[in-house]
Image (spheres, rainbow, N blue to C red):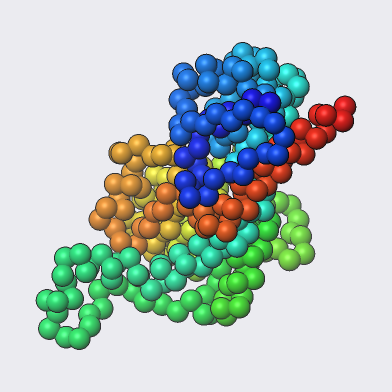
Amino acid sequence: MNIVFLDSTAIPKHIPIPRPSFPHNWVEYEYTSTEQTIERAKDADIIITSKVILSREVLQQLPKLKLIAITATGTNNVDLEAAKELGVAVKNVTGYSATTVPEHVLGMIFALKHSLAGWQRDQMTGKWTESKQFCYFDYPITDVKGSTLGVFGKGCLGTEVGRLAELLGMKVLYAEHRNATTCREGYTPFEEVLKQADILTLHCALTETTKNLINQETLSLCKKGVYLINTGRGPLIDEQAVCDALKSGQLGGAALDVLVKEPPEKNNPLIELAKNMPNLIITPHIAWASDSAVTTLTKKVTQNIEDFVQQLNHK
């Protein structure tokens, strides 16, 4: 089996993917552009990738390919219909970030509610050293306990965020789907969550109905000064609407681990805004990436490959 890992830098170098037990040739590239994909993968039986685009046009030119092993949950970089037609299996990995993403969300809640980024940024200019009093009060500080958290997406991540939030004394509301005609048990109508929440956190899948879930209209329904956290997918929010809401104060702050385009353009409006707005925290899509989560992920990738080859050999 020829195995080609097209974008190994999607995994931290200190946590390599375990090699499969069956005989194989392993070729690894740190990064693969669209123009390089076919040449590098033309002899591959198995491709390992996180984000390299495998379109119908590309897949049609990879006649030996049997399996695409994705080092992530999302499969939107692969033309799944074309893969199925061509007899190429696609295996992703789920459940590896069930601890680290909720912990990241909780960290962002505390960072926003206590204005941690603002206080830390001040130390870069020596502001405290110039203070005439032992402290100063330039940024808002509010309690996490007693706040209402609106959770959009009640899968394993959203549920765990809610569980941890309740332990901290927060009130947790799980949002029903937008435009739903009925409300399921354990959920709160979509617009009611927007109106009641002090903090919004996004954990829903990216679909046509959830794209731009947070936009000018939905933000206008929220309390003035609401906080927004997104560790789901970038296109769940309308980036310009979020910029405008931060500038107007409708959003009291935001913590974003994902953006519409990754890596973002240098002139991305949110990146530009974050340079001078301490209540806007942006992290580079790393909420999933604790050492334990990545180790679990890499083991599952290898297990997916092992299971596939074993099934192949028994046909």
Q: Assign the N terminus to one quadrant of the image.
A: top right
**Quadrant of the rendered structure where residue 264 is?**
top left
196 vs 65: above or below: below
In the image: residue 290, left or right of residue 173: left
> What residue occupies the far front of the structure in this picture?
23
267 vs 227: above or below: above
Across and down, in percent, residue 171 comes to 60, 74
In the image: residue 99, left or right of residue 313: left
**Quadrant of the rendered structure where residue 302 is?**
top right
Across and down, in percent, residue 288 comes to 54, 53
Q: Residue at x 70, y 31 (%)?
A: 23
Q: Residue at x 74, y 52 (%)?
A: 181
Residue 223 or 53: which is nearer the viewer? 53
Res. 221 visible in picture: no
70 vs 270: above or below: above
Across and down, in percent, residue 149 comes to 56, 68
Across and down, in percent, residue 99 comes to 60, 62
Q: Assign the C terminus to one quadrant of the image.
A: top right
Q: Residue at x 68, y 58 (%)?
A: 156
